[in-house]
Amino acid sequence: MENEKINSKILKNNYIPTAEFYSQIIDSLQDYSIFTLDNDFVINSWSSGASKIFGYEPDEIIGEHFDLIFTEEDIQNGIPKNEIETALKEGRATDNRWHICKDKSEFYAYGLVFPLTGIDGELLGYVKILRDLTERKKSEDAIKKYVKDLEDLNTHKESVLAILSHDLRSPLSSIIATTGYLKSNFERMKPDTVKEMLELLYKASIDELNMLDYLVEWARIKYAAEVFSPRKIELVEYVQKVFVTLNDTASLNTINLHHDIKENTSVFADGKMLLSVIQNIVSNAIKHSLPGGEVTVSAKIKDDKIIVQIKDSGVGMSKEIQDKLFTPQVNILSKARIENKGAGIGLLLVKGFLEKNGGEIWVESIEGIGSSFYFTLPLEEPLNKIDCADKIEFDERV
């Protein structure tokens, strides 16, 4: 009798799981997306956790091919197919990547794919399990960016010191030496000689002041993030400001400044940066144009960006110079300034400004005919906020 009571308790406490029981367990895992595929990779079950993460209700997603949750890039690279092949070959496949939600937003997930087999070992389909790790991924990326920014900061600091050494120290030494000579020999020197030396000193001082302005502006943009304020601005307004500033210089060289940019042509950029970019390139175009020449600024829209062209009818440049123009070594920068043949640090600053604004720059030139500088800027605020593309690097090899 006692044994019968014990057996009765055992039978009452034994629970035989049902399909509904397992379904309840799966649906209780709200932080995990769990769904199954048939042999054609069509989704045929969908957990409540999957609905929470992806945004699709079961009746919206069941019957759809599982490519739907992958990015276009992953689909083109054959990632979904590779996952299935790996799962079949090795019994499981890991999945660490970005996925697409119903609202087209992306989330980063760690996932596994397993083959589903029946009692007789036949392949019934596949099960895919994903866990949303977006916040962890963002934190890891933020840490990596912080470390990289520190490394860049150190690299840029060394680069600035190299520029100061090459482009400021030597000319300043010459200025000091010339000033010392004038101080010691002024009374014995002819007036014309004194005037000539003073003019040289004046020009050298102006050049050094311009160099300091470049470096200060670079440092302002590089290290003072709060002053970087991109917004929608009118392109023609900034072109006209530059023309007003450089009009006297152009007139002295009988260079005509012209633009054919339509009113209400706007770009998304930082105003001070854009002004520096246009002024730098136009100033160089004037400097390298022949008397009676013309500098023309034009623009055209392509897709989600604007392409600005600044064209001169100057001396042009060789292919060798073009290739090195935006990736100069420090000694090349110095030589360019001394020979008055290039923008040196100015063009490097321009490149950094444009990259920070989400743009790029290139040049097309023919010796003896002239050069065209092209740069791009976004028309609208990018989906990924512009905030860290400001790599202005120097190759310090000599």
Image (spheres, rainbow, N blue to C red):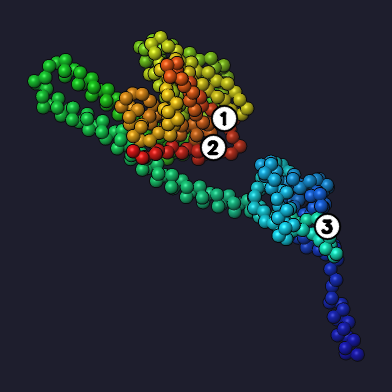
**Crowding near the residue tagged with mark 2, few <14, some 14–19, many ≥20 C-alpha atoms within 10 Å:** some
Number of the front mark, 3 or 1: 3
**Crowding near the residue tagged with mark 1, few <14, some 14–19, many ≥20 C-alpha atoms within 10 Å:** many
Label 3 or label 1, whichever comes before in sequence order: 3
Q: How many labels does the image show?
A: 3
**Type of amino acid under label 2:** Ile
- Taking the view exactly as shown, the residue that stands out farthest to the bottom is 1
- Residue 237 visible in the current orientation: no
The correct choice, above or below, for 58 with respect to 259 in the image is below
The residue to which callout 2 is attached is 386
Q: Which quadrant, please, contains the N terminus? A: bottom right
Q: Which mark is residue 378?
A: 1
The residue to which callout 3 is attached is 124
Measure the alpha-carbon separation of dots 3 and 1.
49 Å
Report the side of 99 relative to 11 (left or right): left
Viewer-proximal residue among 167 and 358: 167
